[in-house]
């Protein structure tokens, strides 16, 4: 297997990103530097000093927060929620399917997803919060429960690199198009409420059930989608004859055909627009991450844009 860092992730490179995981936050508790800034109200809550709301008890809630008077009066359990959070749980959903094993210029989408995951994990650990993951490929989805430790981060990185390095052109896919939803199902089991879920993926194979899972999860958690894509998925190179293959079949394409160029660009733009509009209904930010520009620069740019929105 090649050691080319553009094609395969390497554990030492992901560990080195620890020193770059600064200057940004995905948590809404820091409104200026968070990509979640600008939302109407964060759903991330904790047991602090300031009362925020009274709501129905949900499975997993701390029974010490029960309001016995309201519970007795309504005959239904209610808890008191406070808005000062002591710690958060963050869950990364890291896509390492064959659709991610693609890159036309700088790096494979699978490598970029690994780097995004590493930056997120190190940043979360630096704030003292819990970090877990569901790392998935076309065949399996491995759960790593949220922990507040360097050992937990390393477990996530090692599992990600393991799946990443297993990708190759002859990788046998078992025609399982539902792995994205499998990962979201596992997320719903690990994070019932009050967590931050970060789905790092190209979202290939997403369907109505994917949207339903995200809707359900975002109802009781915060949710962010770093959407990973490659320049060649967005726009065909001008005036070239390309041979496109899925590993079994192949076809020759003339990218110089004006109508094909326009249709290709329009199709990508409409898919992105539709994805963003669907997720916007549930206050889920979509962060576009491409394979051409260093991941750190793209994340910091997103934070800068969030600052501008928050200052208006």
Image: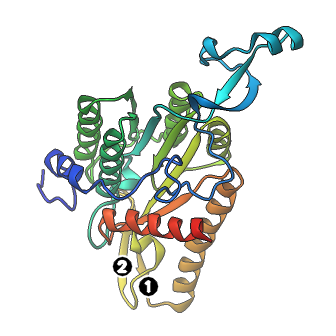
What residue is rendered at 33% in x and 68% in y? 297
Residue 14 picture location, percent across and down: 22, 49
Relative depth, front residue between 182 and 119 = 119
What residue is rendered at 68% in x and 20% in y? 58
* Residue on which the image places disc 2: 242
Total marks in image: 2
Residue 70 picture location, percent across and down: 82, 15
Q: Is residue 71 above or below residue 149?
A: above
- Tag 2, which secondary structure? strand
Answer whether residue 139 is visible to the viewer in this image: no
**Picture disc at residue 157:** none
Give me the C-alpha separation between circle 1 and circle 2: 7 Å
Local crowd size for mark 1, using a 10 Å CA cut-off: few (<14), some (14–19), many (≥20): some
Relative depth, front residue between 53 and 192 = 53
Relative depth, front residue between 98 and 150 = 150
Local crowd size for mark 2, using a 10 Å CA cut-off: few (<14), some (14–19), many (≥20): some
Report the residue that reaches farthest toward the front.
Answer: 49
Residue 107 located left or right of residue 191: left
* Residue on which the image places disc 1: 255
Q: How is the image coloured?
A: rainbow
Answer whether residue 30 is visible to the viewer in this image: yes
Q: Quadrant of residue 244?
A: bottom left
Cβ atoms at labels 1 and 2 below 8 Å apart: yes
Q: Is residue 190 above or below residue 121?
A: above
């Amino acid at each position: 297997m090649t050691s080319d860092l553009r094609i395969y992730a390497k554990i030492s490179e992901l560990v080195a990103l620890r020193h770059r995981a600064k200057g940004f936050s995905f948590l809404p508790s820091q409104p200026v530097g968070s990509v979640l800034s600008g939302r109407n109200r964060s759903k991330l809550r904790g047991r602090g000093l300031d009362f925020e709301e009274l709501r129905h008890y949900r499975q997993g809630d701390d029974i010490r927060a029960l309001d016995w008077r309201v519970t007795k009066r309504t005959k239904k359990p209610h808890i008191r929620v406070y808005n000062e959070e002591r710690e958060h749980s963050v869950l990364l959903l890291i896509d390492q399917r064959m659709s991610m094993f693609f890159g036309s210029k700088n790096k494979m989408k699978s490598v970029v997803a690994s780097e995004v995951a590493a930056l997120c994990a190190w940043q979360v650990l630096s704030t003292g919060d819990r970090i877990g993951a569901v790392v998935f490929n076309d065949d399996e989805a491995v759960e790593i429960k949220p922990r507040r430790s360097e050992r937990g981060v390393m477990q996530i990185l090692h599992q990600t690199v393991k799946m990443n390095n297993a990708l190759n052109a002859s990788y046998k896919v078992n025609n399982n198009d539902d792995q994205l939803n499998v990962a979201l199902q596992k997320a719903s089991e690990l994070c019932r409420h009050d967590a931050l879920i970060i789905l790092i993926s190209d979202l290939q194979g997403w369907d109505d059930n994917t949207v339903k899972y995200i809707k359900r999860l975002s109802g009781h958690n915060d949710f962010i989608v770093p959407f990973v894509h490659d320049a060649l998925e967005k726009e065909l190179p001008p005036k070239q004859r390309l041979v496109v293959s899925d590993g079994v079949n192949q076809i020759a394409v003339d990218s110089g055909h004006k109508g094909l160029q326009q249709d290709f660009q329009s199709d990508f733009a409409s898919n992105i627009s539709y994805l963003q509009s669907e997720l916007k209904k549930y206050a889920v930010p979509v962060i576009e991450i491409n394979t051409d520009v260093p991941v750190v620069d793209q994340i910091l740019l997103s934070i800068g844009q969030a600052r501008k929105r928050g200052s208006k």
